[in-house]
Image: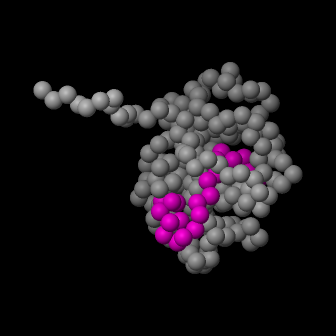
Amino acid sequence: MLLAIDTSAGTSVAVVDRDAGVLAELIETDTRRHAEVIGTMIQGALDEAGVAVTALSGVAIGMGPGPFTGLRVGIAAARAFALGIGRPVVPVVSHDAVAFGRADPILVVTDARRREVYWSAYSGTDAEGLPIRASGPGLSAPDALEAIVPGFASYRRLDAEVVSAASLGLVAELLYLHKRPFASSEALYLRSPDVTMSSGPKRVS
């Protein structure tokens, strides 16, 4: 049984079980309220599911792609919660959750702000029901997708306002069941940070 969290777009928190399915899911679409709602949503999902934290085997977290500010809230919350209950963090590519359960070729697109979008192309699902990522994740101007995405015309575009934590958790359960690798523990920002460290000491006049 997993607690699942994604803040790559809106905020979504769920409790899922490989056998019982989705026990609870809460969603907030406002992309400016991640830090405000994440704590109450975690507690709310656990209460709705009627699950004690001791029953959880891990915490699944969406690693993006996503904007830095929102994405780091969910990752930090998941890592802190997992550390507190002594359970592992299970990283999953957020776009894989959007593609989960869709057998047709789709192009998952989420808002990257600054007039850009994140994208990932999926050719369908494999025998275990896991999405097959053909290319991406990538970052692009919206009008450049056709030129950048290989085989663009073969995909049905799917714009996601929020990433379902329930789907994210179920992807994590299947990855574990079929001994597939999880995502990297590094967040997928796909964009250089606005603030960088200076190369030397600041000169004082």
Q: On the rendered structure, is 92 left or right of 123?
A: left
Q: How is the image coloured?
A: one colour
* Residue 44 can be seen, yes or no: no
Q: On the rendered structure, is 184 left or right of 203?
A: right
Q: Quick check: 33 above or below 3?
A: above
Q: Which of 68 and 112 is in front in this view?
A: 68
x 45%, y 60%: residue: 37
Residue found at the far front of this picture: 200
x 67%, y 24%: residue: 148
Q: Quadrant of the C terminus?
A: top left
Q: Quick check: 15 above or below 164?
A: below
Rendered image quadrant of residue 178: bottom right
Q: Quick check: 130 above or below 105?
A: below
Q: Locate residue 64, reporting x and y percent.
A: 58, 45
Q: Bounds of the magenta span?
A: 77-101
Q: Number of numbered discs present? A: 0
Q: Locate residue 186, reporting x and y percent.
A: 55, 46
Indicate yes or no whether the magenta region holds residue 96: yes
Q: In which quarter of the image is the N terminus?
A: bottom right
x 47%, y 49%: residue: 72
Q: Locate residue 191, reporting x and y percent.
A: 51, 33
Q: Locate residue 201, reporting x and y percent.
A: 25, 32
Residue found at the far right of this picture: 127
Indicate yes or no whether the magenta region holds residue 140: no
Q: On the rendered structure, is 123 left or right of 3?
A: right
Residue found at the far left of this picture: 205
* Residue 126 can be seen, yes or no: yes
Main secondary structure found in the magenta portion: helix
